[in-house]
Image (tube, grey):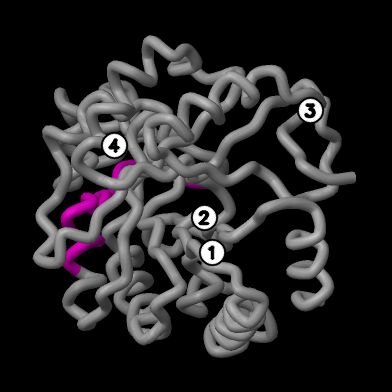
Amino acid sequence: DPDTLATAMLTWGHVNAVRVPLNEDCWLGINGVQAQYAGSTYQTAIVQYVSTLHAHGLFTIVDLHWNAPGTFEAQNQEPMADKDHAIDFWSSVATAFKSDGMTVFDLYNEPYVSTSNAQTTDPWACWKSGCTITSSNGSISGSWQSAGMQDLVTAVRSTGATNPLMLGGLAYADDLSGWLANVPTDPLDQIAASFHLYNFNTCITSGCWDQNVAPIAKQHPVVTGEMGENDCAHAFIDTYMPWADTNGVSYLGWTWNQWDCSSGPALIT
């Protein structure tokens, strides 16, 4: 029940935003997703859920989390958004929420384009403008065209939506080293960087944050869209949060699920 969930979050701590991951196939009603879980049914459920969170004073971040090219089912996180469906997805999502001033769009959850899974010598160029992806993930095999962040920004703005946009970096949003040099053009200049941080990532020291995150925060908002650790403890995030507070960077804990915290980050039991 969304009301019970929101009340629990507000009781648990100083929560003011909730991130809502979305599935491309479910939203668009494509690639064999059962009708009772897809299309208008899924869209209505998400819109109502977001509206309930707003009623409790909570902002929401909706993100493209699961996707797949062509007729493959969206069951995983791919290296980048797929050009086949992601532009249609964001055109539709933006239309649904463009009058909602309490919703932010996180355009792609965790890009991980590299020279080993894409036909590119510059993963950041692919991140911005798209390229041919050659990775095999689960049932997906073969080459397919990705959508660049510029494609997704343009898709959103073409609907008239003015919502702020979050753009995650490479290496599952842990690498922001090339973000400033490749940030897409937004006619509204409403782009934030999304940074994902776990104790098992690469950029886990204040030196890395000073070098790669702080310079962005001087020019754009930075949201730590996911933050956590996989040891059922909090020593690592206790080092990050004061740094983030000092540098004007916000953060969301991952995840509000009843998972085993020793096998993956979890906030609750």
The residue type indicated by label 3 comes to Ser
Amino acid, disc 2: Trp
Secondary structure beneath label 1: strand
Point out residue 205 in the picture as x, y percentages from the top left corner.
47, 12
Residue carrying label 3 = 263
Residue ID for mark 2: 66
Q: Nearer the viewer, mark 3 or mark 1?
A: 3
Looking at the picture, how far across and down is residue 266, in whole percent?
A: 76, 39
- Point out the tag, 4 or 1, that comes first from the N-terminus: 1
**Which three-letter amino acid code belongs to the residue tagged 4?**
Ala
**From where the camera sits, is residue 123 visible?**
no
Mark 3 vs mark 2: which is more N-terminal?
A: 2
Choose between 52 and 109: the one closer to the eye.
52
Q: Which residues are magenta?
A: 139-154
Instruction: Report which residue position mark 1 lands on.
Output: 23
Q: Secondary structure at mark 2?
A: strand
Give me the disc on residue 217: 4
Disc 4 crowd rating (10 Å Cα; few below 14, some 14-19, many 20+) is some
Mark 3 vs mark 2: in front: 3
Q: Which quadrant of the figure contains the N terminus? A: bottom right
Q: Are marks 4 and 2 in contact (CB under 8 Å)?
A: no
